Image (cartoon, grey):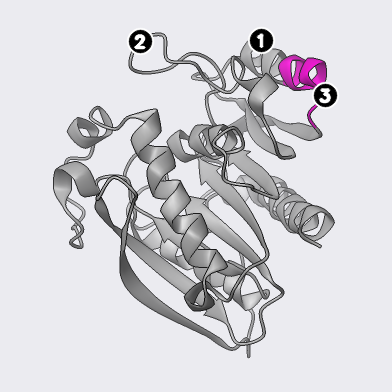
Amino acid sequence: MCFEPDSLPPIRPLSGASVSHRNLVLEAADGNRFAAFAASPDKPHGVGVVVLPDVRGLYRFYEELALRFAERGYAALAIDYFGRTAGAEKRDEEFEFMPHVDQTTPDGVQADVAAGVAYLRSPGGCASRSVFTVGFCFGGRNSWLAAAGGHGLAGAIGFYGRPGLGRPHGTAGPIQRAGEMAAPILGLMGGDDPGIPPADVDAWDDALEQAGVEHEIVTYPGAPHSFFDRKYEQFAAESEDAWNRVLAFLERYGR
């Protein structure tokens, strides 16, 4: 788990920004129905963002993050992972998420991402012409993998995703699939993250370099896993820098 249920993104709401939002149930190509939260600016830039949560799935942190994107002109859709095993209903803080994480598959996650991308490209998603993914932890990894998923992304952003082999045991990760990446990559990593050693981050950077993929991998010295959280006041500067890099990435590759 990246964030506590009461955590919030370390981003100030924009006063006076005009946005709308709603809860959705989307359907993937395999028939899976899953929950999503859409935030739409009144004056969209033509750029959309699929938000991929951490292992807890869709909850308030990511709904608030979608709103922060929409306040800045980006259509945003935060999706859930557990429609196949937990249904599409809202869940409370007592939800036991790990048994459902263990039942996800890379193909299932990417099918749901594809449905999210299609929504953002539709009139309901502001007819976004350029679509990105941004994810955190489990979602960071899957955001990078989405660049190899055939979605036609403009870019893929990941906060502290694990880049190596994953579950089920030996499943190819971003490092192993770097040669399939068809979009620019941004990685934002904590330098004091015991679950993701520096050697793995270096290997990810090297794999992208060898594959010729446009990329930027940034490590914040001393920052822990899940540093991008309003509760971590001591890492406010790192969070601000990371957010500014996300916005610059969207601007650079979304136009």
When asked about the image quadrant of residue 88, the answer is: bottom left
Reply above or below: 211 against 100.
Answer: above
Indicate which disc residue 94 carries: none
User: Relative to 183, is 44 above or below?
Assistant: below
Please tell me whether the stretch drawn in magenta is mainly helix, strand or loop: helix
Q: Nearer the viewer, mark 2 or mark 1?
A: 2
Residue 120 lies, in percent from the top left, at 53, 65
Query: Quick check: marks 3 and 1 in contact, CB under 8 Å?
Result: no
Q: Residue at x 48, y 77 (%)?
A: 124
Query: Residue 165, how many percent across, how many down?
Result: 48, 13
Determine which residue is flagged by label 1: 199
In this image, 2 relative to 92: left or right? right
Which numbered disc flags the more N-terminal residue, 2 or 3? Answer: 2
- Residue wearing tag 3: 212
Please tell me how many numbered marks the rendered image carries.
3
Above or below for 62 versus 32: below
Q: Tell me where the magenta segment starts and ends, as one range.
A: 205-213
In this orientation, does residue 95 appear?
Answer: no
Quick check: 72 left or right of 196?
A: right
Q: Which quadrant, please, contains the N terminus? A: top left
The residue drawn where x is 52% and y is 77% is 123
Disc 2: which residue: 169
Identity, as a three-letter code, of the amino acid under mark 1: Ala
